[in-house]
Image (tube, grey):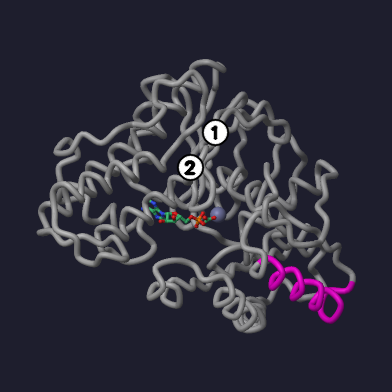
Amino acid sequence: MNILAIETSCDETGLSIIKAEGDIENPQFEIVDEIVATQIETHREWGGVVPHLARREHDKNLPVLLGKLFDNLEDIQPDDIERLAVTVGPGLDPCLWSGINYTKKVHKSNFPDSELAGANHLEGHLYSFFLSNKKDSTFSVPYLDELFPAVQLVVSGGHTIIVLMKSLIDWEILGSTRDDAAGESFDKVARMLDLSYPGGPEIQKWAENGSPDSIDFPRPMIDSENYDFSFSGLKTAVLYYLKENVQKKSEEDLKFDMDDSKKSDVAASFQAAVVDTLASKTIKAAKKYGAKSIMLSGGVAANKLLRETLKLRSQSLGVKFLTPPIKYNTDNGSIIAIASYINCLSDKSYDLESQPNLGL
Ligand code: KG4
Ligand code: ZN
């Protein structure tokens, strides 16, 4: 089945065409063509994503990217698209509408015979582990039945969730954040350190020259009985540390002035606290539920220390560890196309309207 997917839930405009085949026991995916336009530069000067600017960029990008996507294709023409998928949530309402309205429009004009389908952004991340295993030109996991039960940490700018996957299509949320998402806390702490948006990659870069043990930041809820997180308290601990130990740079914006070595130490110690908390809870869930694999997805999964820590701890536990290459952890159309194929195999559908708070 040829699927074209469109993703506009936040600040990346992502389009992808995949060929999907196989049944729910062993789906296989070939990425025919994909394209992502990031809006990071647009939002950087505001220190975060501005929804109406993001919508404007999506509106502008979509027709250009769709043209480019088909430009170099010989094998597949618009008539060959059998399923047209678009993210309907969760995400920023104006951005979701941009993608949905555009998809409805091109469905009529360019792909009238395709089946129009809404897709869940979080399922995109959840199924992104398929992209961790490529053979020839196809992504698949031939040992799929050996992965479940799996415990997956979905960790992004908007979500921090631990999911118990009993099978590919049957899962349960074990815990999630009670306040800030992990990515959000990276972004907020980066702002205090006067680093640019998005904060995650900046903190990672500065942390490379710092000592993770130099400041003893808390690991909130690490010993609690449940699988929930609270990253707002950690952010506040960093704020108090900075207030007590360094000069404020600007009063109203809570930015602090410090030398490079102090900045590196704060970044490294903060990153260590987040990673330790995320990894410990994930491993605890894997032990409790006898997981055969641990999976990691979402924008924060691009973090090197988090990837390495979870990989090592999975190995010590004797379970498989799966995470896609970094480019498929950040938002893109290919993960949405994969989720839509699995929806098709399992007869699951979503209404074609913006659902900003859609869950898993
Ligand atoms: O999944 P994503 O692209 O968008 C959402 O759906 O939210 O995630 C974006 C988040 C941002 O908060 C960003 O700071 C964080 O992922 N991020 C990172 C890294 N790269 C991106 N956080 C920590 N370390 C990184 N290397
Ligand atoms: Zn995402």
Q: What element carries label 1?
A: strand
- What type is the residue that disc 1 sits on? Ile
Question: In the displayed structure, would residue 4 be above or below residue 233?
Answer: below
Q: In which quarter of the image is ligand 1?
A: bottom left
Q: Quadrant of residue 236?
A: top left
CA separation, marks 1 and 2? Answer: 14 Å
Please give the count of numbered marks on the rendered protein: 2
Picture residue at 47% right of the left edge, 23% below the top: 319
**What secondary structure predominates along the stretch shown in magenta?**
helix
Residue with the mark numbered 1: 162
Is 86 left or right of 333, judged from the image as shown?
A: right
Residue 125 sits above or below residue 153 on the image: below
Single out the mark in the foreground, 1 or 2: 1
In the image, taking residue 272 as reference, residue 317 lies left or right, namely right
**Residue 30 figure quarter:** bottom right
Residue linked to disc 2:
323
Residue nearer the viewer, 191 or 283: 191
- First to last magenta residue range: 96-112
At a point 55% along the width and 38% down the height, the residue shown is: 161
Residue positioned most to the front = 251
Q: Position of residue 349 (x, y in %)?
A: 83, 50
Residue at far right of view:
113
Helix, strand or loop at label 2? It is loop
